[in-house]
Image (tube, rainbow, N blue to C red):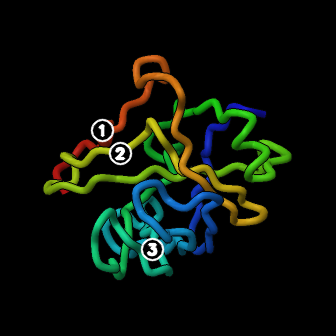
């Protein structure tokens, strides 16, 4: 079961990060909110419901990220999830797994990139989540932290 393809979008779901979102102290609870209008059904907002602290800073309110299910835009996308993550998230079958990737938005939208190297892995049954950071390089994984969006038009 360690390879997941994540063809199913995750929307309208509450997530609890097993170890918090890396780089954001206290970022454990999130809601996935579908976006209306442009990109409807493709993009969602991953909104943190906790008060978050960034290194040596004051509290950060309203932390959110633009995300997508990688299988929607990259049909060949798959990632090898290690056994530690399988156990931590209580993933008992491939059907439990869904993934989101963080989009780094730019204008036009076609200039945006996605972090396909370290997806957010979700147990669809329980809402447990964690960001998977492989122990190998981008070249070995075959996916980049800054993968261009496969869009044909300037949005």
Tell me how far mark 2 sits from mark 1, CA to CA: 5 Å
Dividing the picture into quarters, in which one does residue 67 lie?
Answer: bottom left
Which residue of the protein is positioned furthest toward the right in this rendering? 92
Q: Residue at x 54, y 75 (%)?
A: 31
Comes first in the chain, label 2 or label 1:
2
Q: Mark 3 against mark 2, which lies toward the viewer?
A: 3
Which residue of the protein is positioned furthest toward the top in this rendering? 140
Which label is found at residue 40?
A: none
Where disc 3 sits, the SS reads: strand
Coordinates of residue 104 in the picture (x, y in percent): 28, 53
Where disc 2 sits, the SS reads: strand
Tell me how far mark 3 sits from mark 1, CA to CA: 21 Å
Which residue of the protein is positioned furthest toward the front in this rendering? 56
Tell me how far mark 3 sits from mark 2, CA to CA: 17 Å
**Which quadrant does the N terminus fall into?**
top right
**Which quadrant does the C terminus fall into?**
bottom left
């Amino acid at each position: 079961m360690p390879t997941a393809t994540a063809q199913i979008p995750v929307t309208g779901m509450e997530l609890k990060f097993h170890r918090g979102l890396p780089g954001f102290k206290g970022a454990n609870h999130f809601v996935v909110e579908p976006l209306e209008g442009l990109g409807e059904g493709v993009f969602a907002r991953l909104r943190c419901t906790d008060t978050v602290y960034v290194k040596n800073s004051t509290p950060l309110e309203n932390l959110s990220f633009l995300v997508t299910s990688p299988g929607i835009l990259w049909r060949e996308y798959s990632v090898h999830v290690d056994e530690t993550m399988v156990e931590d998230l209580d993933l008992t079958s491939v059907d439990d797994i869904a993934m989101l990737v963080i989009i780094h938005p730019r204008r036009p939208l076609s200039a945006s990139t996605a972090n396909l190297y370290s997806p957010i892995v979700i147990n669809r049954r329980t809402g447990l989540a964690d960001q998977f950071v492989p122990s190998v390089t981008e070249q070995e994984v075959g996916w980049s932290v800054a993968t261009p969006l496969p869009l044909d038009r300037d949005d």
